[in-house]
Image (tube, rainbow, N blue to C red):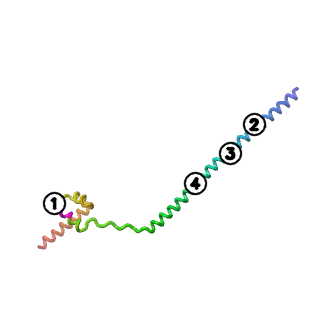
Amino acid sequence: MPVVATLGLVAAGILLCLVLFLFAKVEIWRLSRRTESGQQRMQACLDELRQSLEEMRVALRDLEERTGVLVPPTPPRSGLNLTTRAQALRMLRRGETTERIAAALHVPESEVRLLIKVHQLTSAQGQAET
């Protein structure tokens, strides 16, 4: 009887090992499938990103080509033409401040101050010559 019991225990141990081996194989198979599907999703995302990057490269190349064809902007015109100069001097004679003159004529205040200095110098020279 001890031999039969020993053989039974050995058989049960082998059967248990076989069952555990099969469960391990099934679990490995499940993990492998899950990993493969994750890799496929990642590959699809990577392909999509590559396509977007290539589209951006093409768009950038087109923009660079268009930029090379564009005409450079015209330089800004001088803030004080003869009409603006006359208006500024009229406003100065009426007692307006340089800030108000600049705001009214839409020119920088520094240009208005320069105009006033030049006007004062030229009028002072004109008075000295007479």
Q: Residue at x 38, y 66 (%)?
A: 73
Q: In the displayed structure, would residue 77 be above or below residue 12?
A: below
The mark lying in front, picked from 4 and 1, is 4
Helix or strand or loop: what does disc 1 sit on?
A: loop
For marks 1 and 3, the one nearer the N-term is 3
Count residues near mark 4 (Cα–Cα under 10 Å), then give few for <14, some for 14-19, many for 20+. Answer: few
For marks 4 and 3, the one nearer the N-term is 3
For marks 4 and 2, the one nearer the N-term is 2
Q: Residue at x 16, y 62 (%)?
A: 93
Q: Are marks 4 and 1 in contact (CB under 8 Å)?
A: no
Helix or strand or loop: what does disc 2 sit on?
A: helix
Magenta residues (range): 87-91
Q: According to the image, label 1 marks what residue?
A: 94
Q: Amino acid at mark 2?
A: Leu
Q: According to the image, label 4 marks what residue?
A: 48
Q: Are marks 4 and 2 in contact (CB under 8 Å)?
A: no
Q: According to the image, label 3 marks what residue?
A: 33
| The magenta stretch spans residue 54 | no
The mark lying in front, picked from 1 and 2, is 1
- Gap between marks 4 and 1 measured at Cα: 70 Å
